[in-house]
Image: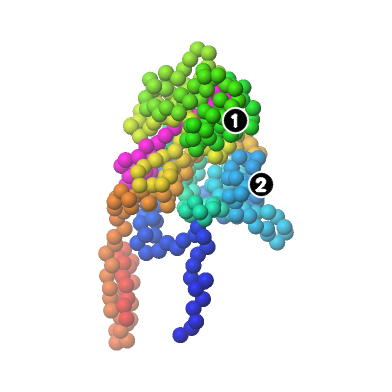
Amino acid sequence: MLPMNNDLLHTPDGMRDTYGQELARKQCVVDRIRDRVRLYGYEDIQTPSLEFYDVFSSEVGTTPVKELYKLLDNEGNLLVLRPDFTPAVARCAAKYFSDEKEPIRFTYAGSVFGNASSLQGKLCETTQMGAELINEPSVYADAEILALLIDSLLQAGLEQFQISVGNVEYFKGICQTAGLDAATEMELRDALSGKNYYAAEELLRSRGLDRATRDLFLKATRFVSTREELAAFLTDDMHPQARAAIERLMRLCDVMDAYGFSRYISFDLSLLSKYRYYTGIVFKGYTYGAGDAIASGGRYDGLLAHYGKDAAAIGVMIQIDMLMEALRRQEIPVDTARDRQVLQISDDDYRAQIAAAAARRNAGQTVILSV
């Protein structure tokens, strides 16, 4: 018996093997979602796992540098393993569709890599699926992406979930009203995006802001679910940027109602993202049994300009591994069953047995030849 090197049997921290029925269920869910997204007119796109560092640099407002897997190629160029699909798709669109003015619809699926601390218990390689709608600035594009997400989660088998929607322009508008400097705005963004409202209030108080100004931020932490509740945020003296953000969400309510998906939507004006390239609506999808959001996305009208194309865009990303965990904990079955037939093969009649197996496979049946 050969000596065993146990180090070769293990994966690096944050990586894992997937096989058997677990992989079959995962692939089934991916196929269901992909088939549904294609019905909305989205075409597949595949970008490389390795990209130049500048595609995801801090100027773009994407993944923090410390969370990137970095390496050098033979020419000394700094490369990263793809941490996020959206900048990669934006780069691709700017390269191949620089002069295209009509809406462009892409869908993708694949691995992303985040160099998270092993103490966080998170996977460093995860599977994401998503869609990007480019060259379309309207509220109908916002609604299409949200409808596509809801439709996809329903196709995956989920019944109970909620999409929380915000608008980063509201936050930017009330920051303008409060006269916050860039450093304070960034610190406040981190506190609110982490739902640390106590830290947010302490920060605002430490900057000498009065009660009325602090309340502009703190009342944004209330969850609302109707057009009328959104309208209650409007005031005569509010910043135009914040007003436009609320009015956009109110219009979105109307369009989502036309899709018949209003019951899956709620609003959180304190919702922000660690990705600073978002410029309009942002959203996250939640369900019970998952340790984090199962989906996220938003509008990123300035991102493509980093790669040379001035275009509006909005996208959505589904965390497939998180979705699978939710399906498992909610005991929602994913039917991967296929009848498998076993044919015995022997030296006496192997030609006929191989021919019989081939005929059945050509008819769409799963056949195992067993010695």
Task: Give the residue type that dot 2 points to.
Answer: Asp
Quarter of the image for residue 255 reads top left
What residue did someone put label 2 on? 54
Residue 38: mark in rendering: none
Residue 110, percent from left and from top: 49, 53
The residue that appears at 44% across and 32% down in the rendered structure is 165
Q: Is residue 161 magenta?
A: yes
Quarter of the image for residue 366 reads bottom left
- As drawn, is 210 to the left or to the right of 353? right
* Viewer-nearest residue: 362 or 318: 318
Decide: is 333 above or below 264. Answer: below
Residue 95, percent from left and from top: 63, 44
Quarter of the image for residue 148 reads top left
Residue 31, percent from left and from top: 39, 52
- As drawn, is 348 to the left or to the right of 27? left
What residue did someone put label 1 on? 185
Q: Quadrant of the C terminus?
A: bottom left
Kindly report which numbered mark, 1 or 2, lies closer to the viewer in this rendering.
Answer: 1
Residue farthest to the bottom? 348
The residue that appears at 39% across and 40% down in the rendered structure is 286
- As drawn, is 143 to the left or to the right of 13? left
Q: How far apart are marks 1 and 2 (CA)?
A: 25 Å
The residue that appears at 28% across and 79% down in the rendered structure is 344
Q: Which of marks 1 and 2 is nearer the N terminus?
A: 2
Query: The residue tagged with tag 1: helix, strand or loop?
Result: helix
Q: How many C-alpha atoms fall within 10 Å of the one at disc 2: few (<14), some, or many (≥20)?
A: some
Decide: is 263 above or below 117. Answer: above
Q: Does the magenta stretch include residue 28?
A: no
Task: Give the residue type that dot 1 points to.
Answer: Glu
